[in-house]
Amino acid sequence: MENIIDLLNWRYAAKRMTGEKVEDEKINTILEAAHLAPSGIGLQPYEIIVISDPKIKKQILPIAMNQFAVTESSHLLVFAVWDEYTTERIDHVFDHLISVRNSESASYERQRHFAKQFFGNMSIEENFHHAAKQANIALGLAITAAASLEIDTTPMEGFDPVALDEFLDLHSKDLRSSMLLAVGYRDTENDWNLKNEKVRKPMAEFVTFYK
């Protein structure tokens, strides 16, 4: 494909998938794209749980409102975000940063202090929603990376997060599920959504050039 616009016109939310396995190398590319996503203060307040076992996906199916893409996907990615920006988590990020760069800096300490103060003034629920917005940036890059490999994706918010968190025991890691992303190959014969024209609001209603 010639450019990113071609890629984004090619992709769509696949409603039916074939179940064909996506090669590990391509899955790793998609995950690396998500890994390289920008995040506020570089905290990356989320993890990705990768599920490929058909038995586990089948158990998740009713939790995800019986959406076909859950079980017909090659891999189901669960974006799980921090339930709270704790001082321990923030310290861990900045300690790792200093270790990797092998350099201590007053600016790093200012950022560390700012992060603790900024998130410390939020409620736990506000922490969660902030983290979920950061995870959505990574989700978007994963979708785009998949399209560049001509691999289909279906982002899903239609699931019971409380039930999924319990099923995956996310609370043991102080995480909460925010989004699902089914990754696989479109079923060209049975996917009704494939035939539909892509529709977006007119650009004039979408963009305002402020003067």
Image: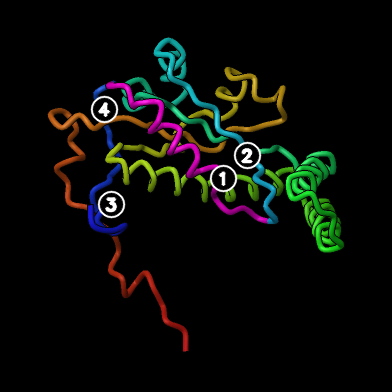
Read off the residue under disc 1: 135
Label 3's element? helix
Q: CA distance from mark 2 to mark 3?
A: 26 Å
Q: CA distance from mark 1 to mark 4?
A: 24 Å
Which one is earlier in the sequence, the residue at label 2 or at label 3? 3
Which one is earlier in the sequence, the residue at label 4 or at label 3? 3
Label 4's element? loop
Say whether marks 1 and 2 touch (CB < 8 Å).
yes
Residue 46's disc is 2
- Inspect the image, locate mark 3, and give the three-letter code of the amino acid beneath it: Leu
* Mark in front: 4 vs 3: 3
Residue at 50% of width from left, 40% of height from top?
A: 32
Q: Residue 139 location, x and y as percent?
A: 48, 44
Q: CA distance from mark 4 to mark 2?
A: 27 Å
- Inspect the image, locate mark 1, and give the three-letter code of the amino acid beneath it: Ala
Figure check: 127 above or below 30: below
Q: CA distance from mark 1 to mark 2?
A: 6 Å
The residue carrying pointer 3 sits among few (fewer than 14), some (14 to 19) or many (20 or more) residues within 10 Å by Cα, namely: some
Quarter-of-image position of residue 41: bottom right
- Inspect the image, locate mark 4, and give the three-letter code of the amino acid beneath it: Met
Label 1's element? helix
Q: Is residue 35 left or right of residue 71?
A: right
Figure check: 63 above or below 159: above
Residue at 24% of width from left, 23% of height from top?
A: 18
Say whether marks 2 and 3 touch (CB < 8 Å).
no
Read off the residue under disc 4: 17
Residue at 66% of width from left, 43% of height from top?
A: 45
Q: Residue 38 location, x and y as percent?
A: 58, 54
